[in-house]
Image (tube, rainbow, N blue to C red):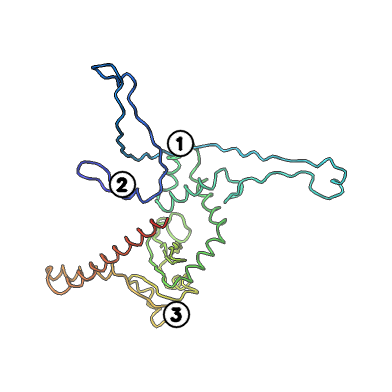
Amino acid sequence: MTVSSQGFRSPAILGRFNLPVREELHELTDEDRVCPCCGEARPEIGEERTTEYDLVPAHVLKVIHVRKKYGPCSCGAFHASGASEVVAAPGPAKIVRGSDFTNRTIAFFLTAKYSDAIPFYRMERMLSRSGLLVSRSGLCKLAVSVGRSIGDLVGLMNRDIARSPVMLMDETTVQVLGSGEGPSGKKSYMWAAVGYRDGKPIHRFAYHANRSSSFADELLKGFSGYLQTDGYSGYEYLEGHRDIVRVGCFAHIRCKFVEAWEIAGKTGVSKEAVDLIARIYAAEAELRRKLESTAIDSE
């Protein structure tokens, strides 16, 4: 979202989404419409329309599911049929059986934690302001239960990533408290991989205590195609691999040319490579803009 010098927000980004719309009508009272000269009502000649965006704060709703129960039929043949004496209407499908939270609420918890990097202790305070009292330990247990519930889904995602013709991999450091694999706050790694299924990206995050190439080899089992990584030496074992072609990253390549250009006093041929990469980025951005525009038009 952009802000102009006058302080007005540009709706260019928000306009990409199919947001619900509510129109509010603002009219003068009959008294305010009276002509000060003759006392007749002023005629309506048109309208002005302005737009603003309203973010509705989170609120907690208690949902009570009432499952109707039904007993045996009074017909003479029922008891001889072997049918169940009592049947009940099914309840809602639950990602975590027996949980006090709806699937949508659980998705909110985990998205805030893993996509927006909101720790559970902060989430505990945020939720309490909305009247929902849930402990940090309860949120942790819920996350573990969800992980166990979606094991089959994760397996299918891993399968599709392995079948992707292109995979992107990177590792980033994380500090883990009380992992049992070393001192508190020990540096560990989150291995990120991106593959594609039907043109749509699949993101996978895998935790490991170290950055060893043996774990990379485990994550790459069954994969054949182009693997894009940075210059980390842990992937050098793939050199000459029959099924995996390792390719580099322009962002890392550009850094080296920029570094050489600055060391040379911002002179020399390194600037030509920087300019070439800038033109590639510009062409890529224009192509992405056209693809997104086409996707929006088709919706």
Which secondary structure lies at badge 1?
loop
Q: Are marks 2 and 3 in contact (CB under 8 Å)?
A: no
Q: From the viewer's perspective, is the residue at label 1 or at label 2 nearer?
A: 2
Residue located at (37% from left, 39% from top): 54
Task: Name the mark on residue 130.
Answer: 1
Callout 3 secondary element = loop
Residue 249's quadrant in the figure? bottom left
Marks 1 and 3 close (CB-CB < 8 Å): no
Which part of the image, by quadrant, shows the C terminus? bottom left
Mark number for residue 243? 3
Mark 1 / mark 3, whichever is N-terminal: 1
Q: What amino acid is found at the position of numbered circle 3 in the picture?
A: Asp
Residue at the image point whose x is 52% and y is 68% from the top: 159
Q: Is residue 115 left or right of residue 68?
A: left
The residue where tag 2 is placed is 11
Residue 205 percent location from the top left of the image:
44, 61
Q: CA distance from mark 2 to mark 3?
A: 46 Å
Q: Which picture quadrant has residue 281?
A: bottom left
| Left or right of 143, for residue 211 | left
How would you rate the neighbour count of disc 2 (Cα within 10 Å): few for under 14, some for 14-19, many for 20 or more?
some
